[in-house]
Image: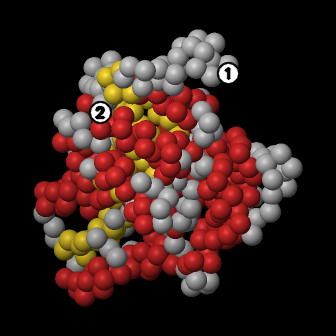
Amino acid sequence: MRAGICLIEDDPFVGSPLSERLEMDGYVCDWFQTGAEALAALRKNRYQLAISDIRLPDISGEELFETLRQEEIYLPPFLFITGHGTIDQAVRLLKLGAHDYITKPFDPSALMAKVRSLCDSRLAIAATQSLGISTAMRTIEALLPRLATSRSPVLITGESGVGKEEVARHLHRLGDPTGNKPFIAVNCGAIPETLIESELFGHEKGSFTGAVKARSGVFEQADGGTLFLDEIGEMPLPMQVKLLRAIQDSAIVPVGGEMPRPVNIRLVCATHRDLKAMVENGEFREDLYYRIHVIHLPIPPLRERQDDILWLTERFLAEIGRRERRLLSISARAASAMVNYPWPGNIRELRHCLERAAVLSASDCFETAALFGGATALAEAANQSMDRQPLGEYMEACERDYINRALGEAGGKISRAAVLLGISRKNLWQKMRRLGISANSGEDA
């Protein structure tokens, strides 16, 4: 992966050798001699860096930069080249968001040092991170190797779709470099209350109607590896007592069994709910809360870590493209819309958005309409500025639209829609009541 640089310099005695130097140092350089040509390229492509002279034959570098800012198009870091007569203008550009400037006549080595510091560090971070390039996700990823050496329970919290299971899987991989140990994931909210004990601890033959043979539960299946209990906040109170005992004793008793069976697991729990508030409301056992809350990893929603949006987009496009045998990308305007959109469904919604575009778009370069088309509230929100309605109302509108889309895909079946959304049926019911969404299916009503 090489950084793409947009060089804007009308003087061929400066632009030509600088372009050659950038190419020799391993960068992909597009050299433009007018602001209009550069503007068209910056609207179309997503460069790692733009190097621009302030004085250009048609429009100034400042006009170019300000035009891109007003269009809310994805802006790479801008490094301006300025003469002594335009230093004040360069300082003004820094206040508007430009990254840095360098004065003529400049030392080519000094310029290349700035280029490397801007491009190489960004590419190095992107290449080494598995969970994200935002400060929050890099902090979590840096902490996981230390947690991998411990068997203490880990609680991962965050909104639905933020990537809690991926964090759990990454922790497991760090603790199992050979890949021989099991990783078992189970959604506590998706299991009927009457079956959850058997699902967790297994059962003996004949222990209940339909138990025609003995079956091991997820605790035994994960023995020696990692057990990931997703949506732990949805677990019924009576079952929480038995779960606490299993964690404390490192042993389980199957349904219909008498003798405890030892298990050695790394327990990772996750929830989108506020367990502390649930404890105060009597909905979650306090002793179990403190037992699983030894290590807490809160994951911020995607709207609070915008640096990850395009990073994730590139990864998903590469993955989808390999599957579809296409070279997929997004336009600069679509990239800007994606960064500005709040993603109430977080990473799950982002991935579904790109997969839908891959199916419906005739072009391999997705525009905003291909990504958000059909969801009018989302498309309009992605292309408008922020000075409209209060944030709470805006988020509710997005959430209502997203749930309605899931219900439509599920044929109005609430249970199926809850699976698509990655939340429990009970939680979906609560959201529907709060948002005024009526159920259209008699089966789930």
Local packing at callout 2 (Cα closer than 10 Å; few below 14, some 14-19, many 20+) is few
Q: Are marks 1 and 2 in contact (CB under 8 Å)?
A: no
Q: Residue at x 31, y 83 (%)?
A: 95
Regarding residue 432, the answer to whether it shows in the image is yes
Residue 81 sits in quarter: bottom left
> Which residue type does callout 2 highlight?
Asp
Regarding residue 86, the answer to whether it shows in the image is no
Task: Give the label on residue 231, or none.
Answer: none
Above/below status of 206 relative to 81: above
Percent across and percent down for residue 245 are 36, 38
Residue 64 sits in quarter: bottom left
Local packing at callout 1 (Cα closer than 10 Å; few below 14, some 14-19, many 20+) is few
The reply, left or right, for residue 165 in relation to residue 170 is right
Task: Give the label on residue 249, or none.
Answer: 2
Above/below status of 438 relative to 63: above
Decide which of 410, 47 is in the foreground and name it.
410
Q: Residue at x 84, y 50 (%)?
A: 441
Decide which of 129, 443 is in the foreground and name it.
443
> Which residue type does callout 1 highlight?
Thr
Q: Residue at x 51, y 72 (%)?
A: 72
- Identify the element where label 2 is drawn: helix
Decide which of 237, 399 is in the foreground and name it.
237
Q: Residue at x 38, y 19 (%)?
A: 259
- Identify the element where label 1 is drawn: loop
